[in-house]
Image (cartoon, rainbow, N blue to C red):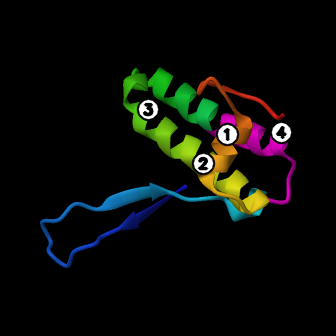
Amino acid sequence: MTRRENHSQSSSSKEIWQPISKSELINKNDINILKHYNYEIRGLYNHAHLACNVGSLHSYNYFMYYSLLRTLAKKYKISVKKVRKKFDLNGKVWSTK
């Protein structure tokens, strides 16, 4: 889901985390890819809900969202921006046009 990069050799520098695509999903149809990501998000949400730690999932949702975008971009061999334009409705709801 994520990749760490350390751009500096200094031990005091911060690591940069980036969402990555899931290559094993690109042969599946769009709905199954979306279901896979939803399944992972719901699983972690249910786990965090039991631990009363749901508020800390904002960054996880960001990584999962952009991982999904990158997976679809890799599947269609287009940019993430074009994936968002193809699937986003009002920046909130996903659809398969």
Q: Earlier in the sequence, mark 4 or mark 1?
A: 4
Tell me the CA gap for discs 1 and 2. Answer: 6 Å
Is 17 placed left or right of 26 in the picture?
A: left
Residue at mark 3: 57
Q: Are marks 1 and 2 in contact (CB under 8 Å)?
A: yes
Residue at mark 2: 81
Quadrant containing the N terminus is: bottom right
Dot 1, crowdedness within 10 Å: few (<14), some or many (≥20)? few
Dot 2, crowdedness within 10 Å: few (<14), some or many (≥20)? few
Dot 3, crowdedness within 10 Å: few (<14), some or many (≥20)? some
Q: Residue at x 56, y 26 (%)?
A: 46
Q: Where is residue 29 drawn, in percent x and y?
A: 87, 48
Tell me the CA gap for discs 4 and 1. Answer: 17 Å
Tell me the CA gap for discs 2 and 3. Answer: 24 Å
What is the span of residues highlighted in magenta in the rendered image?
26-40
> Amino acid type of disc 1?
Lys
> Amino acid type of disc 3?
Leu
Front residue (pair 16, 95) = 95
> Amino acid type of disc 4?
Ile
Quadrant containing the C terminus is: top right
Which label was assigned to residue 85?
Answer: 1
Foreground: disc 4 or disc 3:
4
Q: Where is residue 45 drawn, in percent x and y?
A: 54, 28
Q: Where is residue 89 drawn, in percent x and y?
A: 68, 26
Q: Earlier in the sequence, mark 4 or mark 3?
A: 4
Foreground: disc 2 or disc 4:
2
> Amino acid type of disc 2?
Lys
- Relative vertical location of residue 65 with respect to residue 53 in this rendering, above or below: below
Tell me the CA gap for discs 1 and 3. Answer: 25 Å
